[in-house]
Image (tube, coloured by chain):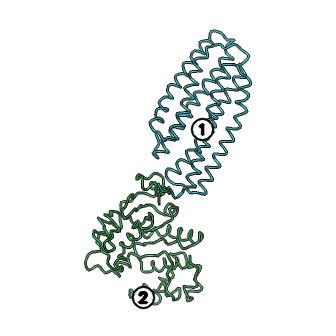
Chain colours: A cyan, B green
Amino acid sequence: MNDSRKSFHKELKELENEMLKMGSIVGESIQNSIEALIKKDLKLAEQIIKEDDIIDDYEVLLEEKCTRLIALQQPVAIDLRKIIVISKLATDLERIGDNASNIAYRVKEIAADQHIIEMSQLSEMSSLVVKQLKDSLKSFVDMDIELAKNVVENDLKVNKYDKEFKAELIKKMSKNCKQIAQGTSLMFISRFLERIGDHSTNICERTIYMKTGKRL
Amino acid sequence: MENQYKLEVKNLDFYYDKFQALNDINMKVPAKKITALIGPSGCGKSTFLRTINRMNDLIENTHLTGEVLFDGNNIYAEKVDVVELRKKIGMVFQQPNPFPKSIYDNIAYGPRMHGLKNKEKLEELVVESLKKAALFDEVKDRLDKSALSLSGGQQQRLCIARALAVKPDILLMDEPASALDPVATAKIEDLIADLKNNYSIVIVTHSMQQAARVSDNTAFFLMGELIEYDTTETIFENPSDQRTEDYITGRFG
């Protein structure tokens, strides 16, 4: 293909790569937050909280690059949609980062106590959530609508994990009021993971818009 | 897209000698809207524009098949008065081309040619045309001065005023701002937007940003074919043909 806007398309590719770097940091942050929970690793929790600033900076960087490309290159059609979507994705990824950081804060609150519940369920949920995020970003890069739709569908599984885990916690807490403090924190953690799932769904819906120009 | 059409082009083929420059063009141009024609050099957009007021008749060894209906009547039918046709379908070119006459005489030239002799009416028409072309305030004190003393942007608006003076229905514009600086271009674009309240406008432009800014509908031509014709919004946000998308995003051409 004879590309008459090579340098613009190169910049667009670089923007996409920056967004993927941000996605990769965010994905690691979620994984680390659950590892910190399971291993009661306060150092790791602190690291996640600290690294949230890097994620915030990425959001600003991507927004600025998107604005500059729009101002200087006047993109249209798929190029314009891609830039708009990357700008929106940056916000979704930043929010995911906030959720991972929120998990880390809760880990710090409950790390001193014995877990009141098996962590396997939450661990499975977090693995699914991370996979959902990775797939959502893969669907963006490959412009794979089928994969994007799968992620949207799979969000129901994330919601189910959240609902079941919370039900278990309520049972525990209603039997023993000493478990309420940790139980509440764990409910929040489950809720944060569920919200991360919603953001991955957003990424996929925006990917579908980017590819087709139509909303899901 | 708008349902009231000023022009309807049916199965239009156009040839420069043996070379086919337009291939089976079918297109309806709505009334009182701005229709932009875009496409790479040599795609046929200017040729197409010129078929709308039979300007190609002036080029030797050309021929055409199909129909161009203006208000339902084929402009290529026998006995069509081409001078009368071009009065109804005016044209503005890429380079401003004022006559080497006064500003006043440039505007009065067309109406005089069409038989208007009354001085008062002529003056009224000159003022009205200059006002419509957003030029009157800038030249009202020097109507007797040479049109060639005007700036490029002013000259182009003078040419638009000259086209308006014979009271056309349609204005054809062939890259009317490509020789102008950004300020003069903005003035022309504002003027075009105002003019669409009273005229149907077809504009050829190489600037896709200009097409996006000024037009209601956009037609994309490629190698003599009309590839896609839709609202400007659709063409620039989400075109349906891959070739349109490749062109407007600069992936070829």
**Looking at the picture, does residue A176 appear above or below residue B252?**
above
Q: Indicate the chain on which mark 2 is placed.
A: B
Percent of width and height locating residue A140:
52, 40
Q: Residues within 10 Å of mark 2 (few under 14, many from 20)?
A: some
Query: Toward the viewer: A175 or A64?
Result: A64
Q: Residue at x 36, y 72 (%)?
A: B52
Percent of width and height locating residue B54:
35, 76
**Looking at the picture, does residue A31 appear above or below residue B248?**
above
**Mark 1 highlights which residue?**
A92
**Mark 2 highlights which residue?**
B112
Place residue A119 in its image quadrant: top right
Query: In the drawing, what numbered circle is on residue B120?
Result: none
The reply to whether callout 2 and callout 1 are in contact (CB within 8 Å) is no
Query: Toward the viewer: B252 or B132?
Result: B252
Q: Residues within 10 Å of mark 1 (few under 14, many from 20)?
A: many
Mark 2 element type: helix
Query: Toward the viewer: A118 or B217?
Result: A118
Amino acid type assigned to the residue bearing label 2 in the image: Arg
Amino acid type assigned to the residue bearing label 1 in the image: Asp
Callout in the foreground (2, 1): 1
Tell me, yes or no, if residue A72 can be seen here: yes
